[in-house]
Structure formats: structure tokens, C-alpha cells
Image (cartoon, grey):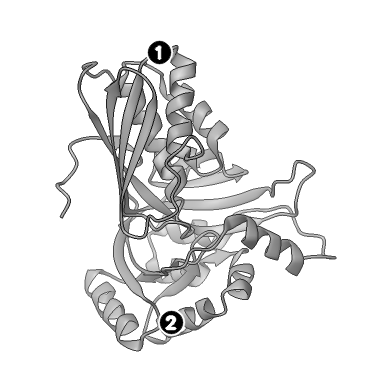
Amino acid sequence: MAADRTSSVSVRVPAKINLDLSVGGVAPDGFHPLATVFHAVSLFDDLTVTPAAEGITLEVTGDHVEGVPTDRTNLAVRAARLVARRAGVERGAHLKLHKGIPVAGGMAGGSADAAAALVACDAAWNASLDRAELLELAAELGSDVAFALVGGTAIGSGRGEQITPALARGQYHWVLALSDDGLSTPAVYAEFDRLSAGRVLPEPRVSDEVMQALRSGDSTALGQALRNDLQPAACSLRPDLGDVLDVGLEYGALGGVVSGSGPTIAFLVRDHEHALDLSVALTASGACETVKRAHGPVHGARIGDLPRLG
């Protein structure tokens, strides 16, 4: 992934939804073991990295980005620092991030940004890290970062950082019901623990129904099989999410599921026309503030010329 040392490198990285999310009880290390089916969809963050003499700086643009940190706590900055440390890079960089993935929306926007920074900084600095090294750094950064590098449709295990490509056919169309107010992932897991207190949770595993639907490319079967063990916790913290789910299903969605820890809700539809119809119905009903349409699977973090914004 070589690049001229004075040139900028731009990377586009997708959002994810979890077609299936099975969550185990909290482990001694404080994390929950997961078994999940990740699915990358065409909602993107765009990152441009420009080499600098020293220091790593971050500029963030996009909708509803208030509160997104621009210091070293940001996952993209942490990713850049990891690349520099691993490759022995002594130069700096300016990171310009335009967010199209909802913030705190359960679609792994922060993890996507970290993946974009790994790829872009590697190229901008001529660090020449191989794929295995980037995946190793991704696992160090967080549960969803490795998938954002890979994209497509994949099975995640461990804490989600162990990625295996899934045998999947076809393209799927989605209507995403967004919320202006995010949900804290730690808060959702804490509510999951509260709701499951006193129960022995089974070992997390991906459902046969989801995998069979993906192998056959059957949208109807996939819609019926969508599952998220965190959904009751998210709906407990935000009861309005249950209302949005009910409205989407009432208006003909093949299935609906809270994405990750929420609050974004992903509705599976038959095709582009069905997506338009459901988007109009959800907006007219007043059930949600913002609706986006997307398709998947799409590729993971990729270098290329970004489309001009606005």
C-alpha cells in the first residue's frame, strides 16, 4: 500500500449491522463473549490522511458530530499512533474525517474510523504493514475494527475481533431508522447484565437459520431470522425503539433488528422500490427522526478518491 510521502491518502469505510448477535455472560476479564454475523452496508465514513512534520491531529465534520473527541482518545487517532509505533514512523499526520455513519448508533462508526486510519496511515507513511499486522492492530483497538477492515459478510467470535468470512449469496436492501440521540454501549451491556441476572446464559453461537438464509440468498428467510440479544436491553433503555420496530414491520418490512447496541434499527426489505416505500411510510408515521437506505454487503476499508461532499 505504498504512497508518495507528501501525498494525502483517502479511505472510505462502511458501517456494519449485526444480522445475528448472540451474547454470553460477562467473563472474568469484564467482557462478554460474542458470536455474531457482521454485514457491511453502504453507509460510509470518509477519512483523508495528510503526512505532517510531527504530531497527529484530527478534524471531524458531518452531521451530529458534537461530542466526538478529537484528541488521543479518538479511535482513529489511537489507530494512527499504533501504526506509527509498529512501523517506527517518526513523522506526524493530519486526519480529516467526514462522518456519514451515526455517532453512538450501534453501527460501529468509531471502529470503522479506526480501520480507515490503519489503512490510510499505513499508506501515507509508506509503513508497508501487511494484512496480518493490520488485523493484529485492529484486534488491539476494539471488537469491531477487524471487521471494518474486511467488510462483506463475516462471522465474528471472541469479543467480535476474530473474523471468519461467511458463505453468503446475494445483495440485501436495508432501511435504517436513525435516532438523533445515541445509546452508550457500556450502558446497554449493563442493562443486558441486569435483565439476565440470575440466569445461566448459553455459550454464544450463530443461528443456523441466519446462515441457511445467507447461503441461499433468501431475503424473506433472513428477515425472519434476524436476532440481537442486546435488543431487549436497548429497548428497555429506549422504549420508543420497540414502537419503531412495530411500525416498520406493520408497513411490510421483511424483518427488523436493533443494530448492535442501538439505537439504529435496520429493516430488511425486498428491493430498492420496497426500500423507498418503507422509508416514506416510516417518515410519514413520525416513528423516527431520520431514515437512510443502504445495501450490503459492501467492501471494507478501501483506498480511493472520495466523492466530493455537498
In the displayed structure image, the side of residue 131 where residue 186 appears, left or right: right
- The residue tagged with tag 2: helix, strand or loop? helix
Residue 148 coordinates in the image, percent (x, y)? 42, 42
**Above or below, comparing residue 223 to residue 1 in the picture:** below
Q: CA distance from mark 1 to mark 2?
A: 54 Å
Can you tell which of label 1 and label 2 is closer to the viewer? Answer: 1
Say which residue label 1 marks. Answer: 90
Of 266 and 36, which appears nearest the observer? Answer: 266
Give how far across and how far down residue 294 sits, in percent: 30, 61
Q: Residue at x 74, y 46 (%)?
A: 30
The amino acid on which the numbered mark 2 sits, given as a three-letter code, is: Leu
To which residue does mark 2 refer? 249
**Does the rendering let one see residue 171?**
no
For label 1, count other residues whose C-alpha is less than 10 Å away and answer few (under 14), some (14-19) or many (20+): few
Q: Position of residue 163 (x, y in %)?
A: 52, 39
Amino acid, disc 1: Glu
> In screen coordinates, is 203 left or right of 11?
right
| Quadrant location, the N terminus | top left
Q: Is residue 55 visible?
A: yes
Mark 1 and mark 2 lie on one chain; the one further toward the N terminus is 1
Total marks shown come to: 2
- Give the x, y percent position of residue 156: 55, 45
